Amino acid sequence: MDFFASQDLARKKTRQLAVLFLLAIASIITTVYLAVNAIFLGVALKAGLEAPETLWDPRLFAGVAATTLAVILTGSLYKVHALREGGEAVARMLGGRPISPNTDDPDERRLLNVVEEMAIAAGMPVPTVFLLEGEAAINAFAAGFSPDDAVIGVSKGCIRHLDRDELQGVVGHEFSHILNGDMAMNLRLMGLLHGILVIALLGYWLLRTMRFSAGSGKRDKEGMGLGTALLLFGGILLAVGWIGVFFGRLIKSSMSRQREFLADASAVQFTRNPAGIAGALKKIGGLTSGSSLKNPNTEQASHLFFGDALGKRFSGLFATHPPLAQRVQRLEPSFDGSFPPVRVSLPSSGSPVSQLAPAPIPTREARAQPRRGIDPHNLPGRIGNLGDEHVEYSRHLLSNLPAEIKEDAREPSSARALIYGLLMDSRDDVRHRQLETLNREADPAVFSETERLLPTLDALPTETRLPLVDLVLPSLRRLSARQHGVFSRNVRALVTADQRVSLFEYTLHRILLRHLAPHFQRITPPVTQYYSLKKLHSECSALLSGLANFGHANPEVAAQAQQRGSVELGFELPYQPEDKADLPAIDKALQTLRLTSPKLKRQLVTAAAATVAFDQVVTVAEGELLRAIADTLDCPMPPFLPGQRKV
């Protein structure tokens, strides 16, 4: 899967969605106009009036168009507003409950382990996981506008019937939707289509109202005509509403089916195990309830799911998913089309994290060595495109984390302590000032937790720092607004305690700001504004010069590294010395560069990697900064693997 090509395709699909939506509106307005015109004509003929010479009435059409547009836009805006919270709004609408990070249920714990592994392997924050507890079928979904507010939803039947490999295949499929832009497009689709469906709801309401009025007994001859006309109009609205349903199904099916094939293929790429996702699809075919869900809101979200959530109610042209057998055959060409019945029993435990042999933890001397060379031209291919080696790496990394750290990462109070501990300086005088600040400003319990965790955190390998941040983000999202405010102020105080900001401090602070802010304040999603870098030379120069300065103390070598990066952009850039191209300058440049198109982001990531890799090595700190830059550009970067020479 090419992340940048997928992002471009998602943008093109969004434009296609807009065109189809406008066609649907035009069809509905035309139908409503003809229906209203027919009603007026019937009333006129019944009253003995002369029929008009033509059916075209500009004033009537303008009134019908304005009214219909108002109804559709009001319905769409209402739904868009209801979905403003992103993935969590969808999960709750579908009856989901968030799974506690410290759950004792073995099936839920197994699911969380798989989601955590996949998120860390992808280099993105761990999504909140919801369980559709009342659904016995096998299904799952991903919802949200970005990885910042993404959630994974899984049915009870999914965790009950699937073994670990199958569950990993399903989760990998949903992560593909998160990474390649499908998720945001699907959520916008829900909001827009609701306006079309409102017409049918309005017709249904009018029919019910007139039926009730008809039973009141207060009907004279004139009233009978008006009541009949209103009943007829209600029926027409209901029929027109079904035009909206038709277009809604058509739009969802045209947007979804091919993307499901791509997500299946990506899940195999992530896990290198086609039998996992194929096994899940086969169990859907063999289960009595299949993937069909009972929640009344399923129709609105049918295009989000792993399997066809509407069962056999729609097929062919209107199916949001490809035929089940066809999906399996693409994964297993030898599949004969038969689906063995699924017996209702607990799934095998597979290979949970706790049963894996821990990978050896590098010594401090090995951790200090800048041992990673990278090929900048291969790096964009890794963005949003993890492999099974990354999943295996994240699994072993999690297994190596001390049990107390993993438990603490899943509680809001101790999660704050973990972040505070990661920001503690190695110099005694600076650390003393930091602890004094926390003792004065932080919650006493959190301060005590921080002191308790410091020895364990000091002993952790540096490679585990950012994955640990990804792991604690779901817990930090559960903070209250007041707690988040205190936490943010304390983080800033710890970062600036020595009046300077290190690469890791910048990276950690940037990740926290980016992934927590949308949960505690209204953030306007970035909109692409630049399709060329011609007007962004200053920002590009600040970014590449800053990277070069951090990697090379000698200004002449730094200038050469910066020029190596500018080659990837296709034009020369002036080198800026360290006093001008520092971390604040990089940060300011990124706020503009993140508004570029996916094609330009590919160039920027390649140029940044070429600058960092000029001396053929990448230190841990440089790798963390490179990841923070990619993350700010909305390009999740899988972790560099130990001993990795090319990525």
Image: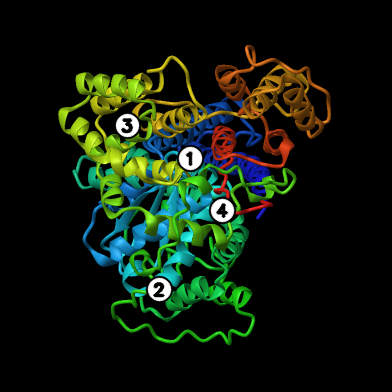
Q: Secondary structure at mark 4?
A: loop
Q: Nearer the viewer, mark 1 or mark 4?
A: 4
Q: How many marks?
A: 4
State the CA–CA distance, disc 3 to disc 1. Answer: 29 Å
In which quarter of the view is residue 194 placed?
A: top left
Instruction: Decide: is 1 above or below 123.
Output: below
Q: Which residue is mark 3?
A: 420
Q: Amino acid at mark 1?
A: Phe
**Between 453 and 139, the one nearer to me in the picture:** 453
**How are the colours assigned in the image?**
rainbow
Label 2 vs label 1: CA separation? 28 Å
- Looking at the image, tell me whether mark 1 or mark 4 is earlier in sequence order: 1
Q: Residue 574: give x, y in percent of width and height.
A: 78, 17
| Mark positioned earlier in the residue sequence (3 or 2) | 2
Residue 334 in the image: above or below residue 452: below
Query: Along the polypeptide, which appears first: circle 3 or circle 1?
Result: 1
Spatial distance from mark 3 to mark 2, Cα to Cα? 47 Å
Q: Which residue is mark 2?
A: 290
Q: Which residue is mark 1?
A: 145
Q: CA distance from mark 4 to mark 2?
A: 42 Å
In the rendered structure, the answer to whether residue 75 lies left or right of residue 330 reads left
Q: Which mark is residue 642?
A: 4
User: Which label's residue is closer to the chain start, 4 or 2?
Assistant: 2
Image position, residue 294 (x, y; %) = 32, 63
